[in-house]
């Protein structure tokens, strides 16, 4: 492991022609050595610093607390919001995290206060020219449903998804079955599947370095192939955790949401994610505090760090 460097993570799959980033050894390392720092994060000199923004595209939606904190608060109501995220480099280049749902889905799913996520991230400069990477943390409808719109809006961008997530959503017919299909998106699955041999899609295999100061970390549990994004910031390492936890309390209380596909994997993923950044710099998927407790830089957009 220690001998691997950043260049080793790029290889071409001869079988499919798809660009595959990562190596089998990293999956093994991710599952066995969850608390180890990744060697690629230490290999280079000082990492560049980025800013992280939360872009709210929907909410608030009030639901039982027991949905966002597993088996806690059956009698309590609490609000959630819906977000995508943007990671901004000093030079203005933007890495987007998740696509949110399409406008049609926003209407069909009755997302309160829905705004097309493309319009929200545009308010902080995410344009066709400034976006070269889009990370898909996982393939639930509210995180990947707008992929067609994103492919059009950001024509230079490559999209990054974990192999385990891709394989389950695209190749495993169980993903089409009730009740699990309800929180996935068969249309998006098809679009992502059709990109398999395209240069727009990069299938990531385990923990990999995305750019100097940005790593993708496999953190399964919520879904089988969820990935989080570790970002170097002025305050130190931070993690865009997406739905690894729905709310900040999840990390503090070691409790996920009810939407868990693999609880043992999730417990290990929490240990891993919490070893990567201070707890107040690990950002959850749906907490209203990301909208309320941070500097507002544009309508519906806050700067988290
Ligand atoms: Zn989710």
Image (cartoon, rainbow, N blue to C red):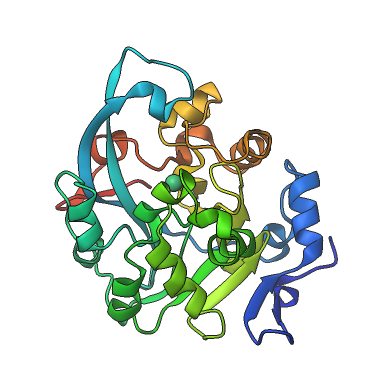
Residue sitting at x 56%, y 75%? 202
Q: Say above or below: 262 vs 172.
A: above
Residue sitting at x 55%, y 52%? 226
Q: Position of residue 144 (x, y in %)?
A: 39, 61
Judging depth in this view, the residue of 255 and 165 nearest the camera is 165
Judging depth in this view, the residue of 276 and 192 nearest the camera is 192
The image quadrant that residue 63 belongs to is top left
Residue 89 visible in the displayed image: no
Quarter of the image for the N terminus: give it. bottom right
Q: Position of residue 123 (x, y in %)?
A: 19, 63
Q: Position of residue 24 (x, y in %)?
A: 79, 64
Residue sitting at x 75%, y 75%? 8
Q: Say above or below: 108 vs 179.
A: below
* Side (left or right) of 163 relative to 246: right
Residue sitting at x 42%, y 36%? 246
* Side (left or right) of 56 relative to 72: left
The image quadrant that residue 106 belongs to is bottom left
Residue 167 visible in the displayed image: yes
Residue at the far top in the pictured view = 75
* Side (left or right) of 2 relative to 167: right
Q: Say above or below: 247 vs 42.
A: above
Q: How many marks?
A: 0
Q: Position of residue 50 (x, y in %)?
A: 43, 59
Q: Say above or below: 227 vs 269.
A: below
The image quadrant that residue 132 belongs to is bottom left
């Amino acid at each position: 492991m220690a001998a691997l460097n950043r260049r080793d993570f790029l290889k071409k799959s001869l079988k499919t022609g798809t660009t595959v980033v990562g190596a089998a050894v990293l999956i093994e390392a991710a599952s066995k050595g969850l608390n180890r720092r990744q060697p690629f994060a230490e290999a280079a000199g000082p990492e560049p610093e980025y800013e992280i923004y939360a872009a709210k595209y929907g909410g608030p939606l009030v639901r039982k607390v027991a949905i966002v904190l597993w088996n806690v608060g059956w009698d309590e109501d609490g609000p959630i919001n819906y977000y995508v995220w943007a990671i901004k480099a000093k030079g203005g280049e933007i890495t987007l995290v998740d696509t949110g749902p399409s406008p049609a889905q926003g209407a069909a799913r009755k997302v309160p206060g829905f705004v097309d996520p493309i319009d929200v991230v545009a308010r902080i400069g995410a344009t066709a020219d400034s976006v070269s990477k889009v990370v898909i943390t996982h393939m639930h409808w509210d995180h990947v449903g707008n992929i067609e719109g994103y492919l059009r809006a950001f024509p230079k961008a490559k999209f990054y998804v974990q192999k385990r997530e891709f394989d389950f959503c695209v190749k495993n017919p169980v993903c089409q079955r009730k009740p699990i299909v309800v929180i996935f998106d068969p249309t998006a699955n098809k679009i992502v599947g059709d990109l398999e041999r395209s240069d727009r899609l990069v299938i990531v295999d385990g923990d990999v370095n995305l750019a100097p100061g940005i790593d993708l970390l496999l953190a399964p549990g919520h879904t089988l192939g969820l990935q989080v994004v570790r970002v170097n910031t002025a305050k130190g390492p931070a993690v865009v955790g997406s739905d690894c936890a729905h709310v900040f309390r999840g990390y503090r209380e070691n409790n996920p949401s009810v939407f868990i596909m693999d609880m043992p994997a999730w417990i290990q993923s929490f240990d891993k994610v919490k070893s990567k950044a201070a707890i107040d710099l690990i950002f959850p998927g749906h907490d209203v505090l990301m909208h309320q407790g941070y500097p507002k830089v544009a309508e519906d957009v806050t700067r988290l760090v």
